Image (spheres, coloured by chain):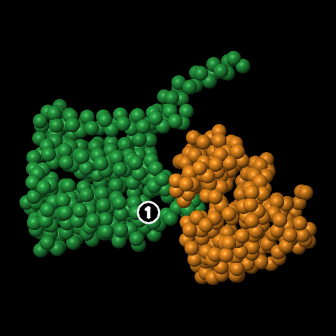
Amino acid sequence: MLSVEGLVAGYGRIPVVDGISLQVDAGEMITLVGANGAGKSTLLKAIAGALPVRSGRVVLEGRDLAKAPVHRRVSKGIVLVPEGRMLFSAMTVDENLALGAYLRNRRAERESVERDRERVFELFPVLGDRRAQAAGTLSGGEQQMLAIGRAIMSDPKVLLLDEPSLGLAPKVITEIFSVLDRLCETGIAMVLVEQDARLALKHASRGYVIRSGAVALEGPASDLLGNDDVRLIYLGAWHGRE
Amino acid sequence: MIASAAIRRQGLRLAALACVVALVLSVLLPGDRYLVRIFTLVGVNLIMVTGLSLLFGYAGQISMGHAAFFGLGAYTSGVLTKGGMPWVLALGAGVAVAAVVGLLLAMPSLRLKGHYLAMATLGFGEIVLFVFGEFESVTGGSNGLRQIPAAQVGSYAFDTPVAKYLLIWSVAFLVLIMASNLVRKRPGRALRAIHGSERGAQACGIDTRRVKVQVFTLSAALAGLAGVLYAHYVGFISPSTFSVSLSLVLVTMVALGGMGSLPGAVIGTVLLTLLPYADAILPGLSRETVAFLQDWETDIHGMVLILVMLFMPHGLAGLVRSIGTRLFAKRVRPALSRAGDTR
């Protein structure tokens, strides 16, 4: 579905992401594991187009989108759920969802947009109860659900998730991840950046360990979970409870 | 329930529109030329403020140079009609010049945000003002441009105060209706999204740069349109009219009415335009009070802006909304407590 080849990106002169390659298939969830500052979020932003790609390719279904602006990538199906959610807090849940479908404004798409809206409310029933409420008045968990719901409204082929569990209660995290699993089953490819590496590796099928802007290790998630180096460095004592 | 709410909103809008039409026409009833003149100015300002409201109030992009676009429309059309061009064509030219200059300014400067955008547009306003003053052979320099003919369509000239008044308010209505259609639909959502979170808007696939340039150009064109109408209404223009202080007043009108509210923009425009002419509305006002309001007009505008920013960030529209919810909440609360008692 999506393959990234030799991607270089960053802020200023020093590349934060220095030649990373990865791929993800339809219906597959992969995760990027690494310390703070390793370049995981930068990589997601570069794939989404929020940061310019210095060199390398971002190939979606055979088409290189490395030079395409964000909105064109969204229309092709690469959709970012940004860190910190970036919702429109003064606008209602309904309006936020409508904005997710901003590019699907043709008359012929009206029905499928409506179906997707129903699907979001089915996946996250609490959003249905709060349709007319301003997004800023939602709880943190509900806001994260809305951010994912808004991305679903863009009809994504690849969903890029930047820290979806940040600051949320364990129960809410479980709920959100079970929805992500369900979305994967419908054929959406997912690239997950998550500070809770153990959680991420449990849901993803494969993982990439990112160190100093490059892939240090990659493999099936279960292998990485069992890898001593990974356990020591990224699943350290502070994540010690099994 | 949602459908009935939509019908109610539609009804409210129609009622509001009817009220405004009635009010606008009622100004003509007393046959007071002073009153008509002042309210013509309200109409001119309203066209500009509507455009600025889309740009500043909805999209959150400030322009401190809107008086320049107003001036560009006025001078373009004034010079062209004095050279013999029919008014209708000069009107198009005035709007086009303002729009094109707006587009050219927007493309580089909308990369800027906040204070930097304010400074860039402020500087632009000063430059245009300088050109009006120095380009004497065309603009008449600081003496201004005199004897600009009245607006004329075919053989009909809008040369009476009432005709001018009706012309300007008809245009103002069309502009308001267009703007209110815009903000309720997809483009309006995009504008508010950019205001709310530019990165979020991008994540939704909104080409934020393009939308910002579009709304800036539209609002420059509307200021140009107001300029054309103003030039042929007053018949005389000079650079001092188009100074930065006008740009600031326009921003204050949007802020006073409430960011992201068109009815608010209308109210802000009416209140601040009428301020120096308060005696026309309140006949009992003493001459000293009116003189005070006129002498201190700029200071009052400044105070209003500061007070609004401090205590009423959502302007008058926000104030009305919060009073509304408070009243509504009072009606709900007893019902809730009763429900609690039965438990």
Q: Nearer the viewer, residue B68 or B101?
A: B101
Q: Amino acid at mark 1?
A: Lys
> In the image, is residue A174 above or below residue A236?
above
Quadrant containing the N terminus of chain A is bottom right
Counting from the top left corner in percent of width and height, residue B103 is at: 35, 68
The answer to which quarter of the image holds residue B153 is bottom left
Q: For this view, does A190 lie left or right of residue B16?
A: right
Taking depth in this image into account, of A231 and B25 the one nearest to the observer is B25
| Residue B33 seen from this side | yes
Q: Assess disc 1: are there few (<14), some (14-19) or many (≥20) residues with their C-alpha within 10 Å of its C-alpha.
A: many
- Chain given the colour orange: A
- Image coordinates of residue A165 in percent, x first then y, are 74, 56
Q: Residue B164 appears at what percent x and percent y?
A: 15, 48
**How far across and down, in percent of the image, does residue B305 sit?**
36, 50
- Residue A194, visible in the rendered structure: no
Question: What is chain B's hue in the picture?
Answer: green
